[in-house]
Image (cartoon, rainbow, N blue to C red):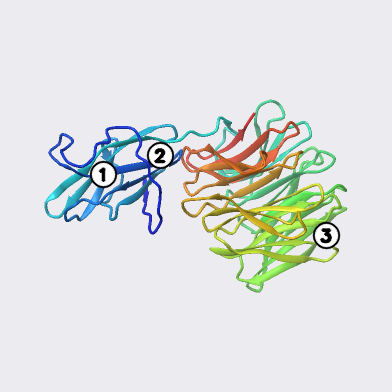
Amino acid sequence: MRARHWHGIGWLLAALCGACGGGGGDDGDGTPVTFSLQAEVRTPSQVDLSWTPHPGPVTGYAVQRNGSPAFPTILQGTLVSDFNLEPDTQYCYIVVANTFPLGPTGRSNQVCARTGTTAPWRLEAIDAAEAVWPGALVIDAANGLHVSYRRSDGVAYATNTSGQWVGTLIDDTAGAVGDSSIAMGPTGAFHVSYRHSSSGALIHATNASGSWVISKIDAIGFGSSLAVDSASRIHVTYRTSAASSSFLAYAVNVSGTWTRELVAGAAGSAIQTALAIDAADAAHIVYAVGSGMCAVRYATNATGTWVDTVLTPNSQQCRAAITLDPSGHAHVVYMEQFDLMYATNASGAWITMSVDKLDWIGFPDVSIAMDLSGALHVSYQDHNADLKYATNRSGSWVRSYIDARGSVGAGNATWVDGNGAVHITYFDASNAKLKHATDR
């Protein structure tokens, strides 16, 4: 288990169930109760603890959880977060004050807290084979799910159109590392883009002929995002490099030939891309530039030339996701410091708001989808690597936890089917599985 200390934050802490006596006396082991402990359940996998100081000299505090040490070291201060816990599980805590060289000189009352529950979504593994990298998701007109992802033996594709998940290997030479993107064309053919791990080339694969055919888009390509327009043209955005500089590149396949152009570039930048195509077949791209602390930018050629806008210079995790409404307005999500942020230009000017405020820096992967009513659905990882979901379907943002068992939620991809059911695919790193969650 991991501990996180709080500094300079005034948390409201509530005592929860258990033998919560005050100071004085002892709890039966000869160590007197000299200070008071409180606990607050923050998430399905996190409990926050705070206690009043031991009245005498103290070297540090040891936290016991269900009778065993919660952390491997003596803690300083009187605030700590206990996380990576199991959902809907009771944990009982006692804090012991230690004074060198005397040992335990005081202790807290015992406080018991039950962690929160996750939403009652259906969770399932997508492929019996071990997954090693997150995937991407698209849903067809019959509400069948189609996923691209990495296994240890290469890039794979899976679908549940037969009623159960069936996985197929696309490219056994591609390696086990790197993102992929998937899209469906108007004729029902599927297209996948990914980076070849050994050569670094950006690859396109399609089953338009009935079997998977592989071709090269560019000699170098990272972080690709792929979409298909109404005329079956394939659009791909990605990061490419030349002369020690990184560039945002855009490629279109017309009649079997790739045409490529550079959209933007900055020396030493790391660009993660997300692409959407509007009803007029114009491209809308969000991408991150930087390393560690990034700028999230939006570029579009809807006017006939590329227009590039900075949405924020302070993205903490250098990833973003985009969806478009029927009018071609952009809806973007990304992480900024401790906030999940949402930005849109639907009003004609960019408006930004916080969707969720986290206790700590959230993980980078985010996804966004819009349903037929115009409501937005967002999946993301919180600071504990739990999978969360937010929607404004009710008129305001409502958040819930979908999966909080282990390290989950990487590479999350969100889609809403024709019946209004929400689907999220994501990587369960603790069990090396690609998973599917749905609210139906």
The residue sitting at the top extreme is 163
Label 2 neighbour load within 10 Å: few <14, some 14-19, many 20+:
many
State which tag comes first along the sequence, 1 or 2.
1
In the displayed structure image, the side of residue 202 where residue 387 appears, left or right: left
Image coordinates for residue 72, horizontal then vertical, percent: 29, 48
Q: Please name the residue shown 68% across and 31% down the image.
A: 160
Residue indicated by mark 1: 36
Q: Is mark 3 on a helix, strand or loop?
A: loop
Q: Please name the residue shown 33% across and 47% down the image.
A: 50
Which picture quadrant has residue 207?
Answer: top right
Q: Residue 85 carries which label?
A: 2
Q: What element carries label 1?
A: loop
Tag 1 and tag 2, C-beta contact below 8 Å: no
Q: In this view, does 366 lie above or below 294?
A: above
Which picture quadrant has residue 113?
Answer: top left
State which tag comes first along the sequence, 3 or 1.
1
